[in-house]
Structures are given as structure tokens and as C-alpha cells.
Image (cartoon, rainbow, N blue to C red):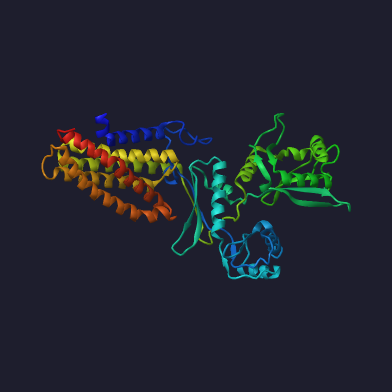
């Protein structure tokens, strides 16, 4: 027990290494590889620079009016009234928000100028303050959330989405998806992702009417996975469940429009829209992607009111890929604003090939090995005592190993900036260990444990002050959205914390065991 109490810092380091080993190699940690990806020896995830892939940096399309007077109207009413005054826009293109200090209205439709938006607000009867280009912080945050959901639902492991702000206060959304082609990523993130159900039905004059948005994304409470018919027929479907309140209204709509007539309806909208029975239209991003009628059994449940007691049905699509995309959009939600991928306002997109990413991996590994050998050589030349130098190198490398385990545990994608952080940790870590060794051995040999502890404490105050300085200097880079610098700062700070709390004290115990008689 006395030995454990005296050497608990070394034991803590061993425990940290074991936990990191579990995080790095256990199959229970981290996400499973997506379809088409190879299994990796470790649970480490690699970012764009080391894996190849696509990076997109683009602003959001939108104009914002500040200090809008809603005149007691609801947000939904304001959106509808303003959209009616903008050509080609609908309520989904306008976002009204009641704020504690200021009400805002945003229009996210393309090709709308600030003058046109200002005129639309005036025509709708809403007084307002300044009208500026760009969207609000809330809209940017919601866009990041939706894009993250889209990437996760699509199984694109290692993908990241974040806001970045330039020195001129321009705001961009930065998307990085490793190991994916540029076209595939743009197709995924550029879609607005709106999904709604319309009813297309014959009217009394012999024509057809459309009752729009009888169900929207917010009305669904459960979205299943894309499936193919068990009978082996063509097409695919997404099973969905509907919330109680919109389910009752939807049930009334299908009965009123004749969609739920006795015997059901047969829809031929996609082939001949001017000669069809009533149809449900599946509308994605404003386009009708499929139309389907209603089976006799479902129609009977609608007419009797039984369907609303357990409201669920299937969204029919033409193929499996279409069904998968609809399921992704339903789960992720609609983008409040679209990305401006035209490049006119500073938006960029780039692609790094997987072969180039492999070259970066090799170069990074080579750089790390060279750094370790250089540090080891300097340490051995400095002391000439293996019992001092060897534990120093091993302890310094253990910091990087622990950081790799942490990265694997949280699924943080490694890129060149993180690798630079690891190399910085090796340098600063060994530098601190040299301070400890010099302080302990600088005044001659040390045989007494009491003398050792006194000298070690003096050294620890020095490296503790240096660690605090590093953390303070790196904290702004870790907090601000500054792209690659953020990863460098985060892992440099983590390395300093691991060093001060775990590895430096452990090295002190190892030195005490090797240099003193009182162990």
C-alpha cells in the first residue's frame, strides 16, 4: 500500500495510457465505417487534409431587416404577408423572429435586392429600420445544425460544419467532408431540403386545384428508413408517422377533396395530370417528385376517422436513392437559407484527392518520427545518462499517445493543424522535463527524498507558470472560429494540461525512484 501511495502519479499515467489504448483500438469506440470505406486499424478519424475530400466555404443567401414593427401580427402572418409582396417567393423564403430587443425579418430567396425587400415590407404595412445583406446569427446557427444532421444522416463520417468569420466581419459556413467527391457534397448541402405533401384534386368546373402543404416536415413525428417493396415491385417508400393535431386536419383534407373516396383513388398525375383522380403530391424543394393515390383500406380509415388514432402511412418514391434523400431531408430538416455557391461573394470549394491525402499522412508520420529522434538525440547528448534521458523521451511520447486516444474517443478528425499541435506538445513537453531534470540534478547528486521533493517543487512552479501562459495565449484561438488554427490550439492546450496534471508529475516520481536511495 505504501508503494502505491508513493507512486500514484506513475500509476495514473499507466491508467491514462491503458484508457487511450482502449479508445484507439477497441471496436466498441467510434463510428463504424460508411459503405465503401475500409476498416481501419485504429479508431482515429482523419480530416480533409489527410484523407482527401471536399471543402466548401460559402456565405448564406439572405437579406435582413432590423427593428421591424409586427403590429401585433404573429411571425407566421408576417412571413406570409411579406412573401406575397416578393415575386417568386413564398412563406418558406421569409423568416420572421420576435426578439427581446429587436424584431427581424429575413428573406432567403435568390436575386432579391435590399431595395426590393424594403419595398415589400412597406407594401405589407410593416415599418422597419435598416435593411442589410446577410442573415442573422440565429439563422447561421440553425443552418450549421441542419447541415450537420444532413452529413450524419448521409453516413459521411468525419464531416464537419462550422461558422467562420473573417477580419472584415464577413460570415461563412465552412463544410469539410473527407473522402468524398466535390459533386456529391455539393448535391447534398446545396439542396434546401424542404419536403411537403400537397393534394391535387378535380374541382367542380372540370379543372384541378391544389391544396398545398397539407403536411410539412414539422408534422412528422417518426421517419423510417428507405425501403423497397417486399413484393419486389418497382419504386421505394419511406414509412412516416404524423403528429396528432396535423393528422386530424390531414384526415379532413383528404375526405373533403375526394382523395379518400370509397374504393380509394388511382393517380396518373405523372403521366397525365389533366386526366387523373385525386392525388397526393410529394413535393421536394418545390418540385413534384412523385404522385400517388390512396388504397381502399387507407381511404376507409380516413372516412371513418380511425386513421387519426394511429396516423402513419408511406411516402412513395420512384427509386431507393430518392427515398433515401427524402428520409435525410425529413430527419435533418429544411435549411433556413441556402449556401451561395456561385463564388461571387467569396465562396469557394476545393477537392483534395485521396492519393494526395495519403502523401500528407506519410509526410506527417515522417515529420513526427524526425521530431522524436531529434528530441531523443538532444536529450541523450545533454545528459549522457540513460536512466534520466530514456524516461524523459518515453514520458514525452506518452503525452501524444494520450492525446491520440482522446481524439479517437471523441471522434475528432485529425488534420495537419492537429499534427502540428502534437509536434508542439512533444517540444514543450520535453522542454519541461529538461527543466525538471536540470533543477533536480543541477546542484549535484541527490540521495535524499526530502531534497528531491524540494527541488522538484521549484521546477514544477516554473513549468506550471509556463503552462498557464501557453493556455492563456492559445485560448482565443481555441474559442474563435479560425479554421485550422482552432485544432492546433485545442490540442496544444490539451497537451499542456495532460503534461502538467499527469506526465510531468509521473516523470518526477520516476526520477525519484532512479536517483534517490529513499524510494
Q: Nearer the viewer, residue 244 or 298?
A: 244
State left or right for residue 458 relative to residue 173.
left
Q: Nearer the viewer, residue 491 or 167?
A: 491
The quarter in which the N terminus is drawn is top left
Q: Nearer the viewer, residue 368 or 386?
A: 386
The quarter in which the C terminus is drawn is top left
Residue farthest toward the right in the current orientation of the protein = 205
Residue drawn at 18 percent across, 34 percent down: 514
State left or right for residue 80 relative to residue 466.
right
Could you say where residue 444 lies in the image, as x and y percent from the top left?
A: 10, 42
State left or right for residue 108 relative to residue 445.
right
Q: Nearer the viewer, residue 451 or 287?
A: 451
Could you say where residue 342 lies in the image, as x and y percent from the top left?
A: 56, 58
Judge whether 120 appears above or below 173 on screen.
below
Residue 269 visible: no
Could you say where residue 451 lies in the image, as x and y percent from the top left?
A: 15, 41
State left or right for residue 386 relative to residue 345.
left
Residue drawn at 43 percent across, 38 percent down: 409
Could you say where residue 266 lies in the image, as x and y percent from the top left?
A: 82, 40
Amino acid at each position: 500500500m505504501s508503494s502505491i501511495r508513493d507512486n500514484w502519479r506513475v500509476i495514473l499515467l499507466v491508467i491514462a495510457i491503458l484508457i487511450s489504448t482502449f479508445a484507439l483500438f477497441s471496436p466498441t469506440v467510434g463510428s463504424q465505417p460508411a459503405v465503401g470505406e475500409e476498416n481501419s486499424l485504429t479508431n482515429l478519424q482523419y480530416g480533409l487534409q489527410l484523407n482527401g475530400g471536399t471543402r466548401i466555404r460559402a456565405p448564406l443567401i439572405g437579406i435582413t431587416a432590423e427593428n421591424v414593427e409586427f403590429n401585433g401580427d404573429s411571425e407566421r402572418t408576417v412571413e406570409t404577408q411579406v412573401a406575397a409582396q416578393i415575386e417568386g417567393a413564398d412563406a418558406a423564403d421569409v423568416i420572421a423572429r420576435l426578439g427581446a430587443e429587436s424584431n427581424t425579418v429575413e428573406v432567403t430567396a435568390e436575386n432579391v435586392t435590399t431595395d426590393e425587400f424594403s419595398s415589400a415590407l412597406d407594401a405589407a404595412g410593416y415599418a422597419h429600420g435598416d435593411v442589410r445583406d446577410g442573415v442573422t446569427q440565429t439563422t447561421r446557427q440553425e443552418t450549421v445544425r441542419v447541415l450537420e444532421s444532413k452529413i450524419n444522416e448521409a453516413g459521411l463520417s468525419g464531416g464537419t460544419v462550422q461558422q467562420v468569420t473573417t477580419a472584415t466581419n464577413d460570415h461563412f459556413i465552412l463544410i469539410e467532408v473527407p473522402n468524398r467527391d466535390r459533386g456529391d457534397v455539393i448535391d447534398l448541402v446545396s439542396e434546401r431540403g424542404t419536403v411537403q405533401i400537397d393534394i391535387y384534386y378535380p374541382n367542380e368546373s372540370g379543372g384541378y386545384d391544389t391544396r398545398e402543404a397539407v403536411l410539412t416536415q414539422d408534422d412528422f413525428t417518426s421517419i423510417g428508413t428507405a425501403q423497397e417493396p417486399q413484393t419486389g415491385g418497382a419504386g421505394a417508400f419511406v414509412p412516416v408517422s404524423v403528429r396528432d393535431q396535423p393528422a386530424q386536419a390531414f384526415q379532413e383534407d383528404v375526405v373533403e377533396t375526394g382523395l379518400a373516396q370509397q374504393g380509394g383513388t388511382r393517380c396518373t398525375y405523372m403521366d397525365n395530370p389533366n386526366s387523373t383522380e385525386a392525388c397526393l403530391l410529394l413535393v421536394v424543394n418545390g418540385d413534384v417528385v412523385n404522385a400517388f393515390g390512396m388504397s381502399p383500406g387507407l381511404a376507409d380509415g380516413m372516412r371513418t376517422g380511425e386513421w387519426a388514432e394511429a396516423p402513419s402511412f408511406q411516402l412513395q418514391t420512384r427509386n431507393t436513392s430518392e427515398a433515401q434523400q427524402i428520409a435525410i431531408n425529413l430527419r435533418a430538416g429544411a435549411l433556413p437559407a441556402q449556401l451561395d455557391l456561385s463564388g461571387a461573394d467569396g465562396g469557394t470549394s476545393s477537392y483534395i484527392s485521396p492519393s494526395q491525402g495519403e502523401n500528407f499522412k506519410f509526410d506527417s508520420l515522417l515529420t513526427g518520427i524526425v521530431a522524436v529522434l531529434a528530441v531523443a538525440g538532444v536529450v541523450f547528448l545533454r545528459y549522457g545518462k540513460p536512466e534520466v534521458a530514456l524516461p524523459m523521451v518515453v514520458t514525452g511520447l506518452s503525452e501524444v499517445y494520450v492525446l491520440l486516444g482522446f481524439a479517437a474517443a471523441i471522434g475528432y478528425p485529425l488534420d495537419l493543424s492537429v499534427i502540428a499541435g502534437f509536434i508542439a506538445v512533444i517540444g514543450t513537453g520535453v522542454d519541461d522535463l529538461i527543466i525538471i531534470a536540470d533543477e533536480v540534478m543541477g546542484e549535484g547528486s541527490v540521495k535524499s527524498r526530502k531534497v528531491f521533493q524540494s527541488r522538484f517543487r521549484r521546477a514544477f512552479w516554473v513549468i506550471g507558470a509556463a503552462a498557464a501562459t501557453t493556455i492563456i495565449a492559445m485560448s482565443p484561438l481555441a474559442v474563435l472560429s479560425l479554421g485550422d488554427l482552432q485544432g492546433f490550439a485545442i490540442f496544444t492546450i490539451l497537451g499542456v494540461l495532460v503534461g502538467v496534471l499527469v506526465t510531468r508529475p509521473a516523470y518526477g516520481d520516476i526520477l525519484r525512484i532512479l536517483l534517490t536511495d529513499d524510494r
